[in-house]
Image (cartoon, helix red, strand yellow):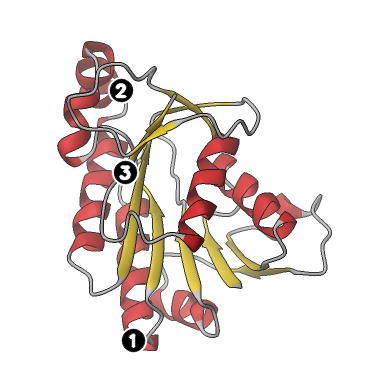
């Protein structure tokens, strides 16, 4: 399958690239700086340098692909996730590319009820407020689109390995989750959506 990944040099994005290549997919990584993926040498990897905030660059990159992944990050900053996602959506709708798999965050939308006091008030209420609001706006753009979208909401990232032993699609009232998930497992779950319509136009949470 021909995949393009926006945010491919991020901590989840790089895991997504590696696992997708391992599954035999043809992968295009859209990046600001190609040197960030210099350690990956694979015949099925194509790297495009560009800025997700430039609509023409995004549209040109998406041409010829079957599935688009968005794992954009910007640390604690706002706007890159939402603006970049809006440009991706506009390009996909123009080009007729339908399948869109987007990583947001646990706590967005109705999953805010899953958060404990620390994450609700301290992290997303103060320290990561800009990033949280950026994800909220990002999700609004996705949900308003005509695409075949899935929004994945992972808990806080860890550096653990792929386990496949995670909870997903739990209710907003579920308080049994650990609020942690490895980046490798996030990538695995994102790729699982290629062969499943279980979460078509849905927003599954992801956590241990």
On screen, residue 129 versus residue 18, left or right, reads left
**Circle 2 is placed at which residue position?**
127
Determine contact: label 1, label 3, CB under 8 Å: no
Across and down, in percent, residue 159 comes to 61, 26
**Circle 3 is placed at which residue position?**
204
Q: Residue at x 42, y 72 (%)?
A: 54
Q: Secondary structure beneath disc 3?
A: loop
- Alpha carbon separation for disc pair 2 and 1: 37 Å
Across and down, in percent, residue 47 comes to 68, 67
Taking 121 as reference, is 185 above or below it? below
Q: Quadrant of the N terminus?
A: bottom right
Label 3, residues with CA under 10 Å away: few <14, some 14-19, many ≥20: many
**Circle 1 is placed at which residue position?**
94
Label 2, residues with CA under 10 Å away: few <14, some 14-19, many ≥20: few
Q: Nearer the viewer, residue 106 or 91?
A: 106
Q: Nearer the viewer, mark 2 or mark 1?
A: 1
Label 1, residues with CA under 10 Å away: few <14, some 14-19, many ≥20: few
Q: Quadrant of the C terminus?
A: top left
Mark found first going from the N terminus, 2 or 1: 1
Q: Residue at x 49, y 50 (%)?
A: 190
Q: Residue at x 41, y 28 (%)?
A: 207
Mark found first going from the N terminus, 1 or 3: 1
On screen, residue 28 versus residue 77, left or right, reads right
User: How many badges with numbers are in the image?
Assistant: 3
Taking 207 as reference, is 25 above or below it? below
């Amino acid at each position: 399958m021909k995949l393009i990944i926006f945010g491919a040099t991020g901590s989840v994005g790089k895991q997504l690239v590696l696992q997708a290549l391992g599954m035999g997919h043809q992968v295009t990584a859209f990046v600001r700086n190609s040197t960030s993926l210099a350690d990956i040498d694979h015949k099925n990897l194509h790297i495009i340098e560009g800025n997700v905030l430039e609509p023409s660059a995004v549209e040109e990159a998406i041409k010829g692909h079957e599935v688009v992944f968005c794992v954009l990050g910007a640390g604690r900053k706002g706007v890159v996730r939402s603006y970049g996602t809006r440009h991706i959506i506009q390009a996909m709708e123009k080009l007729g590319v339908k399948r869109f798999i987007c990583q947001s965050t646990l706590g967005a939308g109705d999953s805010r009820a899953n958060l404990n006091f620390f994450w609700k008030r301290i992290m997303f209420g103060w320290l990561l407020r800009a990033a949280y609001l950026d994800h909220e706006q990002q999700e609004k753009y996705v949900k308003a689109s005509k695409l075949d979208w899935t929004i994945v909401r992972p808990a806080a990232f860890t550096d653990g390995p792929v386990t496949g032993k995670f909870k997903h699609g739990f209710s907003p009232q579920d308080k049994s989750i650990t609020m942690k998930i490895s980046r490798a497992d996030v990538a695995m779950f994102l790729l699982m959506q290629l062969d499943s319509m279980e979460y078509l136009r849905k927003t599954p949470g992801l956590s241990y």
